[in-house]
Image (cartoon, grey):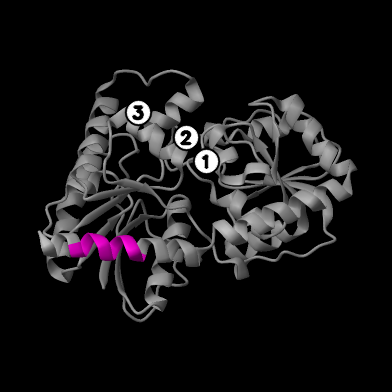
């Protein structure tokens, strides 16, 4: 089968796309990949020279960026040309806006994240009724309801977008997955804390982790500044010399950092899935997670939870793991086993393949 996949180079969608595309290629499929949001870095592009993979990088903006509308309109025309030229059998679209693309093949839209549900989680209210938010909401609504199928990475995310944009009868959940062999589940690591994510994103709540001096090493990996000028880091002064910022790291660097860290903190108040906690689990880190529904859905009793958005309780849970090695090892093993059984790339690719086949057959029979 020939699948056209859209991606962006800004966040975890690129990692997700790499796992999916490589899995499809390994199974003998052909992939045309079109990226948006900026040229991939050398590290991001290290896997792109694969047989049966065609790649079209662009710098068109992403739909969640401010003043994106002219660029989105232009990228729509560009993508329609690529579809006509390459003639894929199915479109796998990782942005909402392309769901309404004019094409004679099935269209699958994946809802990785959404500005309105993000805003509600961060600000506890609906977003302001500005011209831009109205445009964004209309783009997302049209894209979702024009698609032949919609996928979300969690039940929580499916509920969130249906609450905002209306029922989606052709929607289903496919959990994200990672390749376990990319990570090092070694034992005997130092008692240190790690968190990975965009520091500039208020939803990641890195500030909770830095609000108290834990007395043990704390490592933060992720970009400090977003792709837009307004997306600056929300952090104030760092309270302790034990804290170290690593900035953006490539896969090999992150894998090493996970393997050296005993405790991973998922402090987000908004997380449709969360690839970083999964990577930490595959590295056999003990998981500390914010008490929000999506983490309970995904990790169950494989994580210890701190009271929602409470920095004091977060510090208490971390110190409990730091002081009780047996408890830490127990939860590290639980997280590792759950990740290996529920969230592998192999499982994810197989579920998408099944959905692709079903959509193509339905179109052929229509």
Residue 204 image-quadrant placement:
top right
Q: Earlier in the sequence, mark 2 or mark 1?
A: 1
Q: In which quadrant of the rendered view does residue 279 lie?
A: bottom right
Q: Secondary structure at mark 2?
A: loop
Residue highlighted by disc 1? 225
Which of 182 and 350 lies nearest the eye of the viewer? Answer: 350
Instruction: Report the residue at 35% width, 34% height from top.
Output: 161
Of marks 3 and 1, which one's residue comes earlier in the chain? 3
**Magenta region includes residue 359:** yes
Tag 2–tag 1 contact (CB < 8 Å): yes
For mark 1, does the 10 Å Cα neighbourhood hold few (<14), some (14 to 19), or many (20 or more) residues?
some
- The first of marks 2 and 3 along the sequence is 3
Q: Which residue is mark 2?
A: 231
Viewed as shown, does residue 82 lie left or right of 356? left
Res 44 seen here: no
Disc 3 vs disc 1: which is toward the camera? Answer: 3
Magenta-colored segment: predominant secondary structure:
helix
Image position of 343 with respect to 194: above or below: below
Which quarter shows the N terminus? Answer: bottom left
Residue wearing tag 3: 163
Cα separation, mark 2 vs mark 1, equals 6 Å
Task: Name the residue: 29% across, 26% down.
Answer: 133
Q: Which residues are magenta?
A: 353-361
Q: Position of residue 41 (x, y in %)?
A: 46, 62
| Picture disc at residue 30 | none
């Amino acid at each position: 089968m020939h699948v056209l996949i859209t991606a962006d180079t800004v966040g975890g969608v690129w990692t997700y796309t790499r796992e999916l595309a490589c899995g499809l290629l390994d199974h003998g499929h052909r992939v045309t990949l079109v990226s948006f949001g900026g040229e991939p870095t050398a590290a991001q592009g290290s896997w792109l020279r694969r047989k049966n993979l065609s790649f079209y990088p662009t710098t068109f903006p992403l739909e969640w960026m401010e003043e994106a509308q002219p660029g989105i309109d232009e990228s729509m025309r560009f993508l329609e040309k690529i579809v006509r030229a390459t003639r894929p059998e199915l479109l796998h679209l990782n942005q909402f806006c392309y769901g309404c693309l004019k094409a004679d093949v099935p269209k699958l839209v994946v809802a990785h994240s959404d500005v309105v549900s993000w805003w509600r989680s961060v600000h506890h209210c609906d977003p302001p009724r500005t011209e831009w938010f109205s445009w964004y909401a209309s783009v997302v609504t049209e894209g979702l309801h024009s698609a032949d199928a919609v996928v979300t990475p969690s039940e929580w995310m499916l509920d969130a977008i249906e609450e905002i944009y209306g029922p989606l009868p052709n929607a289903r959940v496919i959990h994200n997955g990672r390749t376990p062999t990319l990570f090092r589940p070694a034992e005997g690591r130092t008692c240190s804390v790690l968190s990975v994510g965009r520091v500039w994103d208020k939803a990641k709540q890195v500030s909770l982790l830095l609000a108290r001096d834990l007395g043990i090493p704390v490592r933060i990996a992720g970009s400090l500044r977003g792709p837009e000028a307004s997306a600056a880091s929300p952090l104030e002064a760092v309270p302790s010399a034990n804290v170290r910022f690593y900035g953006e790291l490539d896969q090999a660097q992150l894998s090493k950092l996970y393997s050296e860290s005993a405790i991973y903190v998922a402090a987000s108040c908004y997380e449709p899935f969360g690839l970083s906690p999964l990577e930490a689990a595959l590295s056999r880190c003990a998981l500390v997670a914010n008490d929000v529904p999506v983490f309970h859905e995904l990790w169950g009793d494989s994580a210890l939870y701190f009271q929602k958005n409470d920095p004091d309780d977060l510090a208490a849970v971390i110190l409990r793991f730091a002081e009780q090695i047996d408890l830490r090892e127990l939860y590290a093993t639980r997280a590792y086993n759950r990740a290996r059984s529920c969230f592998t790339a192999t499982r994810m690719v197989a579920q998408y393949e099944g959905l692709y086949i079903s959509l193509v057959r339905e179109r052929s029979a229509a």
